[in-house]
Image: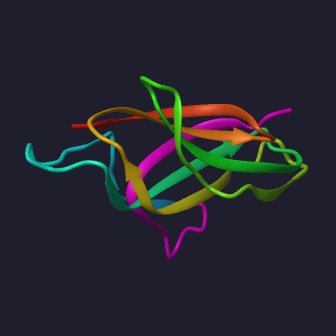
Amino acid sequence: MSPIVRYMILCEDYSPDAFTPLKINIHGLLAQLRFASDQEFPLLYPELCVVLILTSCRGTGEVEIRCIEESSQRLLFSTPFRTIVFGNDPLELRSFCFRIQNCPIPGRGHMLIQFSYNKHVVSECPLIIR
């Protein structure tokens, strides 16, 4: 059974709260990236963070983040598979954060950031490049 994605957040950075372990501070929430009109593509975006809050998690699974160019369905980048041990309490909320450096941006348009569990896409989040 796949986990349920309660939240999938794209941001520039995140940090755990010093006083509340289940609280995550989001810095630089991203729904789109804007570049100067004379910006040359392709380019490398320095760092993108994907924060996931999951529930209905059980057992062990392989997870990854993928980025797809929406118009062509071309894979732009993916993280290495990460084996996660979820435990056995499906009511527990679990947070996972992926920090992706040097993200290739081919040009203006729409990208889809996807979360996959055991090689199946569970959730995706659009990112607009302007």
In reply to whether residue 15 is colored magenta, the answer given is yes
Location of residue 106 (image quadrant): top left
Residue at 43 percent across and 48 percent down: it is 10
Q: Hey, which residue is sitting farthest top in the picture?
A: 71
- Determine whether 12 is above or below 105 in the image: below
Q: Can residue 93 be seen in this view?
A: no
Residue pictured at 53% horizontal, 52% vertical: 51
On the image, the x and y values in percent for residue 75 come to: 55, 39
In the shown orientation, is residue 123 left or right of residue 99?
Answer: right
Please say whether residue 83 is visible from this viewpoint.
yes
Q: In this image, 116 relative to 46: left or right?
A: right
Q: Indicate the position of residue 6 as horizontal and vertical percent values.
A: 60, 37
Q: Which residue is drawn at 86% across and 48% down?
A: 89
User: Which quadrant is home to the C terminus?
Assistant: top left
Q: Where is residue 31 in the image (x, y as percent from the top left)?
A: 33, 39
- Give me the residue at 55% from left, 68% from top: 20
Stretch in magenta: 1-22
Closer to us: 67 or 62: 67
- Residue 120: x and y in percent read 75, 33
- Where does the N terminus fall, quadrant-wise? top right
Report which quarter residue 26 is drawn in.
Answer: bottom left
* Of residues 123 and 33, the one drawn nearer to the viewer in this rendering: 33
Q: How is the image coloured?
A: rainbow
Q: Image height check: is 60 above or below 22? A: above
Q: In this view, does 55 lie above or below 46?
A: above
How many marks on residues?
A: 0
